[in-house]
Image (tube, helix red, strand yellow):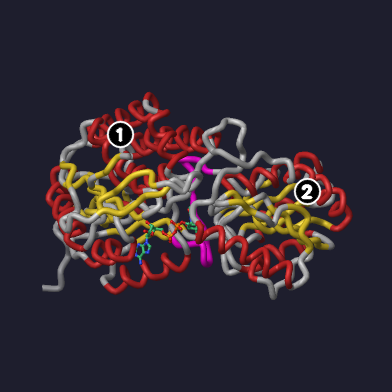
Amino acid sequence: MKTYQMFIGGQWVDAASGATFDDLNPYTGEVYSKVAKGDAQDADRAMAAAFGARKEWAATPAIARAQILNKAAQILETSRQEFADVLIHEGGGTVGKVMFEISQTVDLIETAAADGKRILGETFNNDPTKLSMTIRRPRGTVVAISPWNFPLVLSIYKVAYGLATGNTVVLKPASESPVIGLKIGELFERAGLPAGVLNVVTGPGSVLGDALIDDDRCSFVAITGETLTGRQVAQRAAAKLKPYTLELGGKNPLIVLADADIEYAVKSTAFSAYLHQGEICMSADRIIVEEPIVEAFSEALTGLVSHLPVGDPSLPTTFIGPVISDNQVKKIDGHIKDAVAKGARLLTGGTYEGRLYQPTLLANITPDMKIYYEETFGPVASIIPVKDEKEALEVANDTTYGLSAGVITRDLEKALFLGEGLQAGMVHVNDGTIDADACCPFGGCKGSGIGREGGRYSVEEMTEVKWLTIQKTKRLLPF
Ligand code: NAD
């Protein structure tokens, strides 16, 4: 078993206190690694390193920054297995999930590198006496806080765009996925990133998070996590008037209308609801189906879901691996038991062994059940029948969240009606709820967050816009 140090100022260091914590393998339950347990002293060291490196990095030509990012993408591509092993054994990701995540991450780094070379301003031709323009400058030092479920790609959204736009970064990965965060530090070290430009600190979220956000040298906060955490982070950042982006939870609807190809709709639903054990912010948990097809759809989906292979995530045939922790198993089971006790019908699943939770499908759910409104973050979905697309829209929007939504129909008018009406940051027609593209705006509305990541949206978040004017002739003044 390996012990991992933190990455601060280009050095691999122990926590200032010397403490470590255990990082568990969710499938075996064994300790996967021991990791430095940072506290406020380490946050201070990391902020000092990032702050110290910021001027030189901001002054580095975009093309030189892009070369380092592209080198990191190449190293990641040629070290896929090394990263996949961590994502499987530390995160419980199945082979398919982690390979998809690595490919997505390579593309994201390359896209960020390219976007860093086209940070655009505008000119305003309003006043002939002056040249009037906007320029974009790096915000300074970015604090990036990431979750454990897609720990590589969701860290990289912040790290790659932070670096590409000339910011220095302090990354704090989740306590359930610290090693993948440290591997990101190592990746950029191998790519030749100057010392201090990226720092990775590991340890308890609230302790490190509070210290990093409160630090006057932090100029921007980007977090992906639960809505409750996002609210705490936003309050803390707002107290210091620091800008932030929040990528938070979801309770995502997938609407299947009566004209849908049922076989395609069933497969799309199973993929959206159960990929990575439903531990995806975009997972479909409310499957809203028009009444004429609800019976046929439910029967076909139950058949598919009850045969999804559950087990060892390192086997290429496994579709559903372990959920991340015993606490998460308890939460999932609690939601399902609460629903069944209040009258929900269990179509399949509802049992678990260790951290392997059987994919579960429910019917007859009602708003008094926890599962109706709360994010479960596990392999469970519920079928909700509706009489038409108008009721589908009402049910879909009856949530405090607004991240992703899917609509399956061949009817263009209904697709547009739902596409425009759904309260979500991302709507996919004739697809499930899970999609991401490095160039496209990723994020949600309502309780699912504030701001967008990806492409020019990240560039805008990670840079400060400045209005700059130059008088061509002396300005007319009253004295
Ligand atoms: P979490 O909120 O428990 O933790 C996220 C990160 O925040 C971790 O690094 C954690 O250590 C840190 N943290 C915890 N308390 C903090 C505090 N007080 N101050 C600062 N940082 C703190 O979330 P998780 O369990 O790691 O991830 C699952 C959640 O993330 C789900 O709700 C899921 O929907 C959401 N998520 C959202 C997106 C998205 O893009 N919208 C993507 C993936 C996951």
Rendered image quadrant of residue 152 = top left
Q: Secondary structure at mark 2?
A: helix
Could you classify mark 1 by the number of other residues whose Cα lies within 10 Å: few (under 14), some (14-19), or many (20 or more)? many
> Closer to the observer: label 1 or label 2?
2
Residue 308 falls in image quadrant:
top right
Q: Is residue 104 left or right of residue 6?
A: right
Residue furthest toward the top?
78
Q: Quadrant of the C terminus?
A: bottom left
Task: Give the position of the N terminus as an image quadrant.
Answer: top left
Q: Residue at x 79, y 40 (%)?
A: 263
Please, what is the three-letter code of the amino acid marked with disc 2? Thr
Answer with left or right where residue 79 lies relative to residue 278. Answer: left
Residue 461 quadrant: bottom left
Q: Residue furthest right?
A: 292
- The residue range painted magenta reads 436-450
- Residue pointed to by mark 2: 302
The correct choice, above or below, for 256 with respect to 59 in the image is: below
Label 2 environment density (alpha carbons within 10 Å; few <14, some 14–19, many ≥20): many
Q: Is residue 128 visible?
A: no
Q: Is residue 172 left or right of residue 364?
A: left
Residue at image mark 1:
69
- Helix, strand or loop at mark 1: helix
Q: CA distance from mark 1 to mark 2?
A: 45 Å
Res. 25 visible in picture: yes
